[in-house]
Image: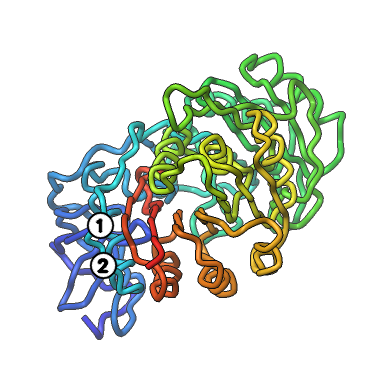
Amino acid sequence: MSKSKKGQVFSDVEILSAASEGMSIARIDNKVVFVPFVVPGDVVDVRIVKSKSSYAEGRAIAIKHYSDRRVPAQCPHFGVCGGCKWQTLNYADQLEAKQRQVLDNLQRIGKIDTSSARAICGSERIFHYRNKLEFTFSNRRWMTADEIANPDFKPQPNALGLHIPGLYDKVLDIQYCALQDDLSNDIRNSIRLYATRNGLEFYDIRTHKGFLRNIVIRNTHAGEWMLIVIVAEDDKKRLFPLLDFLKQEFSQIMSLQYIVNEKLNDSYSDLRVVCYSGTPYITEEMAAYRSEDAALKYRISPQSFYQTNSQQARNLYGFVADFADLHGNETVYDLYTGTGTIACFVAKYCSKVVGIEYVEEAVADARVNATLNGFDNTTFFAGDMADILTPDFVAQHGTPDIVITDPPRAGMHEKVVNQLLATKPRKIVYVSCNPATQARDVAMLAEKYAVKAIQPVDMFPHTQHVENVMLLERR
């Protein structure tokens, strides 16, 4: 195997287990081979696409035996899109793989005792669970192998869908996606048809020409919908008729907005958003931590962050509140507070919450959310966490009894970890979307903090991503 080359084929290879990044693992001559879109128990023929000294990557070119862990794919684009690589793996096995991923990272990277780990919390809904999807217009449509092999297929240049993994300029035309409510498919497909019939140019990411660039579709658990249409030129004569069509066709869209993006990249967080029809936001409701309390309301604007699995977000925040075990007199710091969702979730049960977040627009949303829910014991600050969380800041706003931290995938800056060690809160509740960086940070905190509980949560069925909540108590 060590001498294998790109293109070499191995027959009747058994897939042994699920791995990170949505891959599965096989072994050929004692070498690990990562293979996508297969499940443990499959027996396949594998073509090697990359070979290194310690591992290889392959593609299954034929399935000789189907595993009893395999289930039918719900998406017609499975195997090409790349977004749900575990969709054909039984959901119970997905959860087992994610549990193992969390514990392996904590043990291997952080040398952490995981005996306090609880069973992963699975998602009640494993399809139609997302509340946000973004799609791209392109005049460089990806041709699938089946289309190329079909002599009757007539090539179409335009696509409205998702980028092919690893190819910035190729977009797979998505007819059906099983991750969001079906209305999302209806909206997207209607926009594509309208654009084609009316000669609206799909964007060319290489030449940066064309009119239609992206759409963002958001919805709430209660059925409020937001649509953001992103175009490359401020041409109202072409844009407004499209928006009028959507307004007439889809009464469910309560917030119809547009952005003009003349930049060379697709990011829009720094661009002006114009509300064309309805409200400039939608409002999500979430059951309070205690059943006798009124539901929380969160206002979601076009550039707001909100957990994309609304139902699981309630479970995630419930575990955070469980671990915090608030009695009403605590000072809580909520680091990386975002739009204040966790801060508002716990505010009723403590003395005060101090939220810190890098993005100023998110802090503005956090203040709105606190006001919307009637909380006057929350304060929010915008800026770099490592610069704001200083001894002077703590002296001014009070030493926290409990710190809740929910950093991005990169984890916490070393300065932040050191400040937590110096501040010495009684508890730290650490929420992470990346168990590897969480393990690193918890290892640095280990000199003063002991791990008391570990709770994985599956927010993203059919993907390799997993959230993890840890309770650390001061020694």
Quadrant of the image for the N terminus?
bottom left
- Amino acid at pointer 1: Ser
Disc 2 marks which residue? 113
Q: Residue at x 44, y 22 (%)?
A: 292
Disc 1 marks which residue? 116
Q: Residue at x 46, y 39 (%)?
A: 313
The picture places residue 405, in percent across and down from the top left corner, at: 52, 56
Q: Which mark is residue 171?
A: none
**Which residue is farthest front?**
329
Q: Is residue 342 above or below residue 170?
A: above
The picture places residue 351, in percent across and down from the top left corner, at: 58, 42
- Estimate the spatial distance between the alpha carbons at disc 1 and disc 2, rounded to whole Å: 8 Å
Kindly check if marks 1 and 2 are in contact, taking CB atoms under 8 A apart as contact.
yes
Residue placed most toward the observer, 263 or 417: 417
Q: Secondary structure at mark 2?
A: loop
Q: Is residue 157 visible?
A: no
Quadrant of the image for the C terminus?
bottom left
Q: Is residue 471 above or below residue 317?
A: below
Q: Is residue 144 left or right of residue 123?
A: right
Quadrant position of residue 92 = top left
Q: Is residue 456 above or below residue 129?
A: below
- Amino acid at pointer 2: Asp
Circle 1 residues within 10 Å: few <14, some 14–19, many ≥20:
few
Q: Secondary structure at mark 1?
A: loop
Quadrant position of residue 388 = bottom right
The picture places residue 73, in percent across and down from the top left corner, at: 30, 38
Circle 2 residues within 10 Å: few <14, some 14–19, many ≥20:
few
